[in-house]
Amino acid sequence: MRTGISELASKLRKREISAVELTKTYIDAIEKLNPTLNAYVHLTFDTALKAAEKADQMLKEGDAPLLCGIPMALKDNICTDGLLTTCCSKILEGFKPYYDATVWEKLKAQGAVLMGKTNMDEFAMGSTSETSCYGAPLNPINTAYVTGGSSGGSAAVVCADLAVYSLGSDTGGSIRQPASFCGVIGLKPTYGAVSRYGLIAYGSSLDQIGPVTSSVKDAAIVFDAIKGGDKRDQTSVDYDYGDSLAERLDRDIKGMRIGVAEEFFDGINPEIKYKIMEAIALFEKNGAIIENIRLPALKIALPVYYIIACAEASSNLGRYDGIRYGYRASSYTSIEDMIVKTRSEGFGDEVKRRIMLGTYVLSSGYYDAYYKKACLIREEINREFDAVFEKCDALIAPTAPNTAFPLNHKVTSPVEIYLSDICTVPVNIAGIPAISIPCGKDSKGLPIGMQIIGKKFDEATVLQMAYFYEQNSGIDVGVYEGGARA
Amino acid sequence: MAVSKTEIEKLAKLAKLSFSDEELERFTAEFDAIIAFADTINQSIEGGTEQIRSIGARMVPFETLRPDEVVPSLPSDKILSNVEGYNGFFGLERSKK
Amino acid sequence: MNYEIVCGIETHVELATKTKIFCGCTTEFGGEPNTHCCPVCTGQPGSLPILNQKVVEYAIKAGLALNCKINTKSHMDRKNYVYPDLPKAYQISQYDEPLCENGYIELDSGKRIGITRIHIEEDAGKLIHEKGYTYIDYNRSGVPLIEIVSEPDISSAEEAREYAEKLQLIMRYIGVSDCKMQEGSMRCDVNLSLRKPGDPNFGVRTETKNINSLSFIQKAVMAEAERQADILDAGGTIVQQTMRYDEKTDSVTPMRDKENSDDYRYFPDPDILGFCIDEEKVEEIRASLPELPFDKFKRYINVLGLSEATAKQLIKYKKVAEFFEGAIAEGASVKNAANLIVGTIFSNMDTEEEKELFAIRISAAQFAALVKLADEKKINIGVAQSTLQKMLESGKPVEEFIKPEDLVGISDEELESLCKEAIDANQKVVADIRNGKDKAINMLFGYVMKKTGGKADIRKVEAMLRKFIGQ
Ligand SMILES: [Zn+2]
C-alpha cells in the first residue's frame, strides 16, 4: 500500500523529508512519465517549489495543517489565480483567471503544493477525456486504454503517483468513472457540500468538486479540507459534519442496511457484476443486511441527465464569445461573425453537440416536452431515492457498466458513449454522495470500480463503508512503478 | 422525432455556431440519434404541472439573501487582464482581415 | 378612418441600491470604464451570482405602491441571447414567477391602467461604437432593474404620458429609484396597435424601444399611431417589429434588429435558489411605504384646503412636498407657504429637472420663519415675496433682510389717523370718488403707503378709507 497523506504529513513534521524535497521527487516523476501519459496539461513547477518553501516554513513554525507541503493536482476547470485554466478547450486558450476557486483558496491556505492542472474532456463533456484539445491522457494501468473521463487526468496523476491527490469535478460521473478506470478512489460529495465558486460550469445543478486519492482515508482528509458553505456560492450548504470524517472511518458495519437495486445491474458487463456481487457478499458476511430494492425511474435517468446537463451547458457556454478572454477568431466581417467564428473554431465537436442539444430542449415548442419534463422526472427520481433511503443506509452499485475503453474506440453514435454513464448519473440527478473504489480487475487486467451511494450529507457512511471494504477486501491501490513514491 | 437540416441550422444560429455542409450532414444524422435518445423520457411517467425552480424544492428565505453592502471592485487592469484593453475599455475591431 | 389606440408600456427602472444585483460592486453612476467590476458582473468563468436582498425589497415596495399582489415564492430565470454588452450571454431575469403581479395606476380621470407584472433583472454593459471599433464598459453590467409591464389599457398619447409620469412619481416617492430618464435610470418601451372602434380583436402591434423622456412618450405614441393609421388607410398591413423614436424628426422608424431571433430559451437559473418572503415581511414593507402622491394630493385638497391646481404642483416633486410639509410643521400657514413656493420659488426654476432636484439655499425652517411674518401680518405679501427672493439668492435667513424696526408694523390707530390725514389733504380726490371715479382711490393708497414706507396692509387701508369716505 502507498504511503498515505497522514504518513507523509508525519514524515514532513519529523523533518525526515522536506516539502521541497518531496516536491522535487514529484517533479522528477512527472518529467519522466507525463510526456507519455499526458495527464497534466499545464505544469506549475515554479509556483510549486515556492509553495513548498512556504510549506516548509509553516511546518517549521509548527501547527501546520495535514495537507501542508503535500504535492497535489487540480483539474483544468478549477480556477487558479494567475495560472492557466483552460478546460482543455481551444476557446479558453491562454486564459489565466485573476481569482481562485474557493477549493483552491482553502487548500492553498493549508499549504498545498500544486504541481499542475490535469487533462480532461473539453469542458468536462465526455467519458474518456479524449475530447481534450491537448489529446487524451493515457491510462497508467495500460496505456492502450483511456483513463475515463471527464476527470481523466486527475485520476491518472493519482494512479501513476504524479500527485498525492487531485481534485476533479463530477457532473454525471466524471470523478467516479475515471477513478474506476484507473483503479483509484474518487468521491463525489453531496451537491452543495463543496463550493462551486471558481469551478468553470458545465451543468450547474449537477456539478460538484471532489477528491481523487489512492486511499479512502486520503479521500476523507481531502474532503474534510474542501467542504463547507461559501457565501460566494448560494447553492453551497454549511452542513455541520461534526468532527473530522478522516478520524471516524472505523465503524462496525454489522446491522448496516445496504440496498441493491437491480436497475443498476441492467446491461452491466458480467465480469463487473461478479466482482460487485463478491463485494456485496463480503459486507453480508460481516453482518450487513442486504436489501433488494427497486428504483424504476433509473431507466430514464440517462436522457434526463443529458437533457438537463446540456440545457444548462448551452447557457453556461454562451459567454465564450472571444470578447473578454480566451480565443478570438483572427478574421471576421462583423462582431456577430467574430462570435460565430470564434465559437465554431474554438469548441470541439462534442461540446458543439451538447450545446446544440441544450439549445434544442430549451427552444420554444420543445421546452415542455424535454426540459420541463426532465425536471419533473428528476423530482420523481429524488422521491424514489428518498424512499429507498428510508430503508437503507447506503446502496452498492457498479461505477461503470464496463472497464476502460481502448483508445480511439470507434462508436457508431455519440449515444453509445452516453450509455456508459448509466450507473453514475442518477447520483448527480439526486445530488447525493457516492464514492468509487477499486474492487478487482477484469480478465484484461483493467480495474473495476464499485460505487457506494449514500444519503444527502451522509459522506460519513459512504466513507466508512468504503474504508471497511478497503481494509477487508485485500484490494488497495498499491505502489506505482515509476511514480514518486515507488 | 427526426430533426431537419433547416431546424439544425436554426438551432446553430441560436447557439452562435456555424457548420460546413459536410459537418451539417454529419451533425444532422448524429442529432437524430441524440433526439431519439432524449425522446425516451416521453415513454414514461406523466409530467406534472408544478412550478419548475432550480435545484428542486430548495428555497431560501428572504432574510438569508445578500445584504446590500459595497465590496471594493477590482482594478480595471485585472478585469482586462485576459484581453487587449483600450484605455480601460474592452474592445475590438468590428471587422478584421 | 377612425382608429382606437391600444397601447401598453414596459418600463425599466434602475433601482437605487448601493450594490449590483448579484455582486458587491457599487452601482454608482459614472466612474472610469470597467472600474466598478468584478468576476461576477463581467461573466468570468467560474463566477457565481449572489442575489442582493435590497433588490427584492425594493421590487416589493414598488409592487405594493402599484397595488400589486406580491408572490411570496419567486425565483430567477435565465434569458439567453448573445450580445457583446451581456457578458454571460444570458440576462438573469424572472420569467414565469415574477415578484409582483396584478396591480394598477389610477389616472386623474379615474381610469385605471393595469400593471401585469413587475420583475427584477440585471442591466447590461455599455457599448461605444467609434471609427471601426467597438468598446465595452461593464460598469453598468449587473445594475439592478425592475421591469414594470402594463396592460394594453392605454388609449391615447396623453394617457401614455400620464401613466409614465405617475409611475415615475410613485417610484421617486417610495425612494426605489431616481427615475432620471435622461440618464437612463428609467426607460420606456411602448407597445402599440390600432383597431376599429368596437372591434374586440387586437391589431398587429409594434414595440418602440428605449424612449427616454416623458414628452417623447407622448410624441412617439402619436407618431406611431399616425404611421399605423396611414398604412391601414392605404389598405396595408402592419408588420410586427421593433421601432425607434427619433426626436429630431418626430417620427418612428424600424430598428435594425440586434438579434434575428427572440427565442430566449428561458429556464430557471440553477445558480440561484428560489426564495420565499413571508406575509409578515410583506406587511412590514407595506407599513414602511410613505404617503403616496395620490393620497397626498387628496389630503392637500380635503384636509389642507388647497386648490387642485396648487396641490398638483406641490405633490409633483417629492422634495417640494417634503419642503412644504416641513414648513407647515414649523408653523407656517398652508396658504402662504403654498403660494410662496408655487409663486416665488418655482419662478426661479425653469425646468422640471430643477424642480425635481429642488436645490434651494434655505431650509424649510428658514422658509417657515418668513412665512410666519406674513401670516402674522407683520409684513405684507409683497415684502414676503421680495424678501424670499433675496433669501433664495443669498441663502441667508430672513433676519438679514427684515430689521426688527421694520417688523413693529403700524397700529390700527396710527393707520386710521394716516387715512384721515390722506382724506383731509386730498378733498378733491375724495369728491371725485364720491362722484363715481372709483379709480381715484389709488391716489389715497399712494399717500398712505408712502407715509408707512410700504408696510401697511393694503386691504386694511382700503377698508378704512372707504369707511371714512362713507362708501
Ligand atoms: Zn461586480
Image (tube, coloured by chain):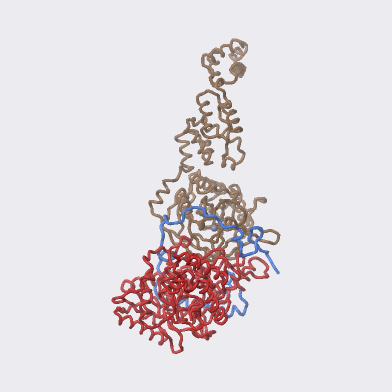
Q: Is residue C76 left or right of residue C249?
A: left
Q: Which chain is red?
A: A
Ligand 1 image-quadrant field = bottom right
* Residue most extreme to the front: A15
Residue B11 showing in the rendered view: no
Q: Position of residue C135 (x, y in %)?
A: 65, 59
Residue C69 showing in the rendered view: yes
Q: Which color has been applied to chain B in this rendered view?
A: blue
Q: Residue at x 56, y 51 (%)?
A: C28
Between B41 and C357, the one nearer to me in the picture: C357
Q: Position of residue A236 (x, y in %)?
A: 44, 64
Please, is residue C297 above or below residue A123 in the view? above
Q: Is residue C44 left or right of residue B47?
A: right
Q: Which chain is brown?
A: C
The number of numbered badges drawn on the structure is: 0
Please, is residue A428 above or below residue C27 in the view? below
Please, is residue C186 above or below residue A299 in the view? above
**Image quadrant where one finds the C terminus of chain C:** top right
Q: Residue at x 33, y 82 (%)?
A: A282
Between C251 and C74, the one nearer to me in the picture: C74
Between A54 and C311, the one nearer to me in the picture: A54
Q: Is residue C56 left or right of residue C204?
A: left
Between A389 and C445, the one nearer to me in the picture: A389
Q: Position of residue C187 (x, y in %)?
A: 57, 52
Q: Position of residue B42 (x, y in %)?
A: 43, 75
* Residue most extreme to the bottom: A443
